C-alpha cells in the first residue's frame, strides 16, 4: 500500500510540474506569469545637458598696437616699460615735431567731427526712444508697418515689415539703442584721447606724445623703433584654445560654456565668441589639424593670472526640467522606443514613447510618460504580466507621502486596514 501511494504521489508531482511548465512556456498561453522585478525607478524631472570637454588658456581679449611714423617727427623717449599697467590716455612715448600747430589743428578737427557724430547719435537715440514709447507691448492689435534703421551717414531709412509683433519691434529698438550707446562710448573715448593730446601739446610746445587707447599691461616695447613700437595687452581676459576636427563640427559660436581653472573653486561662465575655420598650423598630410577658438567671459575675475589653464565644458544642447529615465530603461524595437511601466494594479505594461535628448546615462522622454511613473530598468521581456518587487526603504520618506493625492492616501489607508 505504501509503495502504491509513493508512486502515485511521484506521478502526480511530475505531471503537475510538466503541465505547468507547458502552460508557462507555451506560446500565447493564457496562464498568468509573475515577474520578479528588483531593478526599477521612477520618471524624474531633471535637466539633460549635452556637453563637450576641451582645454583653454586665459589670455588678453585684445592687444593695442602703437605705431610710430618717423616722417617729419623725431623720437625722443619711451614713457613706459614692459609690464607697466596703463589706462586709456596714459602717455606711451614722446616725440618732437616742427609742425605742432598743424597737429593741434588736426586733432581739433577730429574732435569737431567726433562731436558732430555724437550729436547725430543722441538725436537718433532720442527718436528711437520716442518711437518705443509710442508702442504698447501689451496691445497685440496695435502694429506698426515700419521701423527705422541706422545707416553709416546717420540718416533714417524706412523698411516695411509685415506681421511684426510689438514685442519684437521693441526688442529690435532696444538692441539698436544698445549698439548706438556702444558707438557713443567709443566716440567719447576718442574725444578724450584727442583732448589729452592737445593738453600735452599745450604743456610742452616743443614735443608731442602718443597715448594708450585703452586699459592694459605693456606687453612689449621695441627699442629699435620697429613697428609696432609698443604693444599693450588688454586686462580684459578671455579663454582661448583649439578644437579638433570632430569638435569643430559640434561647437558653434554663441554656445555657452563653463570653465574651471586649476586651484579655483568658482566656475567661469561665458559664450563661444569666435571659431577659426582655418587650422592653427598649415595643413599637412597625416597630420591632425586643430582650430583656434575664443570664449568671452560673462564676468571678469581679477585674481586670475594671464596664462592660467582651464578645463572648458561647452554646452552643445540642453533640455531643462523634463521627464527623464535611465538610458538602460529604454527598449528599442524596429526603431520604436518602449518603456515597461509597473502600474498600480500590479501589472507590467509596455508602452511606446518618444525620446529626446540624451547625455551620459540620462534620457529625456518627450511623449508617453508622466513624472513619478514607475518603470523597469532591467528584465525587459514581459508584457501584461503580474509582478512582485522588493520594497525600497529609501522611498519611505515624508516627501514621498506629501506627493500622494488625497485619494491615493485614503486608498493606501483602507488597503492597510483590509490587509490586517
Image (spheres, rainbow, N blue to C red):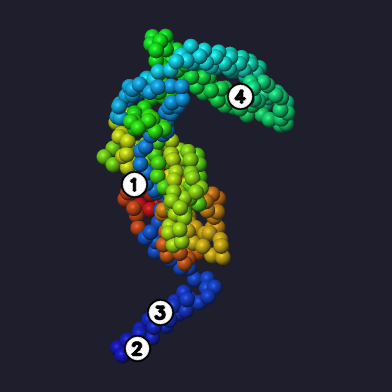
Q: Is residue 251 visible?
A: yes
Q: Within the image, what quadrant is residue 229 found in?
A: top left
- 44 sits to left or right of 184: left
Rendering coords of residue 45 (x, y %): 45, 44
Residue at image position (43%, 17%) is 97
Q: Nearer the viewer, residue 140 or 116?
A: 116
Read off the residue under disc 1: 396
Asked whether disc 4 touches disc 3, contact meaning CB atoms under 8 Å apart, the reply is no
Quarter of the image that includes the N terminus: bottom left
Residue at image position (37%, 20%) is 94
Q: CA distance from mark 4 to mark 3?
A: 81 Å
Q: CA distance from mark 1 to mark 3?
A: 39 Å
User: SS for tag 3?
Assistant: helix
Read off the residue under disc 2: 7
Q: Which is in the foreground here, disc 1 or disc 3?
A: 1
Mark number, residue 17: 3
Q: CA distance from mark 1 to mark 4?
A: 55 Å
Crowd around label 1: few <14 · some 14–19 · many ≥20 (10 Å): few
Q: Nearer the viewer, residue 350 or 64?
A: 64
Marked residue nearer the N-terminal end (1 or 3): 3
Read off the residue under disc 4: 173
User: SS for tag 2?
Assistant: helix
Q: Within the image, what quadrant is residue 138 found in?
A: top right
Residue at image position (35%, 84%) is 9
Asked whether disc 1 touches disc 3, contact meaning CB atoms under 8 Å apart, the reply is no
Amino acid at each position: 500500500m505504501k509503495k502504491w501511494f509513493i508512486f502515485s504521489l511521484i506521478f502526480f508531482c511530475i505531471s503537475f510540474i510538466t503541465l505547468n511548465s507547458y502552460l508557462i512556456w507555451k506560446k500565447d498561453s493564457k496562464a498568468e506569469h509573475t515577474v520578479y522585478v528588483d531593478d526599477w525607478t521612477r520618471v524624474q524631472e531633471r535637466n539633460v545637458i549635452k556637453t563637450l570637454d576641451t582645454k583653454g588658456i586665459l589670455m588678453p581679449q585684445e592687444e593695442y598696437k602703437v605705431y610710430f611714423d618717423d616722417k617729419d617727427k623725431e623720437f625722443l623717449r619711451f614713457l613706459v616699460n614692459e609690464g607697466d599697467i596703463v589706462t586709456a590716455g596714459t602717455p606711451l612715448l614722446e616725440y618732437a615735431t616742427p609742425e605742432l600747430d598743424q597737429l593741434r589743428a588736426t586733432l581739433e578737427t577730429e574732435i569737431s567731427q567726433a562731436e558732430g557724430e555724437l550729436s547725430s547719435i543722441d538725436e537718433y537715440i532720442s527718436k528711437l526712444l520716442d518711437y518705443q514709447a509710442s508702442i504698447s507691448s501689451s496691445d497685440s492689435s496695435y502694429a506698426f508697418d515700419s521701423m527705422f534703421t541706422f545707416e553709416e551717414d546717420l540718416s533714417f531709412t524706412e523698411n516695411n515689415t509685415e506681421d511684426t509683433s510689438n514685442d519684437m519691434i521693441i526688442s529690435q529698438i532696444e538692441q539698436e539703442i544698445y549698439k548706438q550707446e556702444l558707438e557713443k562710448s567709443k566716440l567719447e573715448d576718442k574725444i578724450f584721447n584727442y583732448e589729452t593730446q592737445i593738453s600735452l601739446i599745450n604743456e610742452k610746445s616743443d614735443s608731442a606724445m602718443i597715448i594708450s587707447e585703452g586699459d592694459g599691461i605693456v606687453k612689449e616695447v621695441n627699442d629699435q623703433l620697429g613697428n609696432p613700437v609698443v604693444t599693450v595687452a588688454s586686462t580684459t581676459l578671455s579663454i582661448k584654445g583649439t578644437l579638433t576636427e570632430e569638435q569643430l563640427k559640434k561647437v558653434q559660436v554663441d554656445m555657452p560654456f563653463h570653465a574651471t581653472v586649476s586651484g579655483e573653486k568658482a566656475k567661469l561662465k561665458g559664450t563661444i565668441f569666435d571659431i577659426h575655420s582655418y587650422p592653427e598650423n598649415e595643413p599637412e598630410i597625416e597630420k591632425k589639424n586643430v582650430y583656434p577658438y575664443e570664449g568671452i567671459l560673462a564676468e571678469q575675475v581679477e585674481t586670475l593670472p594671464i596664462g592660467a589653464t582651464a578645463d572648458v565644458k561647452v554646452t552643445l544642447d540642453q533640455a531643462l526640467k523634463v521627464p527623464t529615465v535611465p538610458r538602460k530603461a529604454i527598449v528599442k524595437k524596429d526603431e520604436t522606443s518602449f518603456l515597461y511601466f509597473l502600474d498600480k494594479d500590479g501589472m507590467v505594461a509596455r508602452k511606446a514613447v518618444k525620446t529626446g535628448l540624451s547625455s551620459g546615462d540620462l534620457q529625456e522622454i518627450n511623449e508617453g510618460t508622466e513624472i513619478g511613473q514607475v518603470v523597469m530598468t532591467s528584465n525587459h521581456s514581459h508584457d501584461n504580466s503580474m509582478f512582485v518587487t522588493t520594497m525600497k526603504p529609501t522611498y519611505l520618506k515624508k516627501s514621498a507621502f506629501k506627493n500622494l493625492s488625497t485619494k491615493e492616501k485614503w486608498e493606501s489607508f483602507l488597503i492597510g486596514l483590509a490587509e490586517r
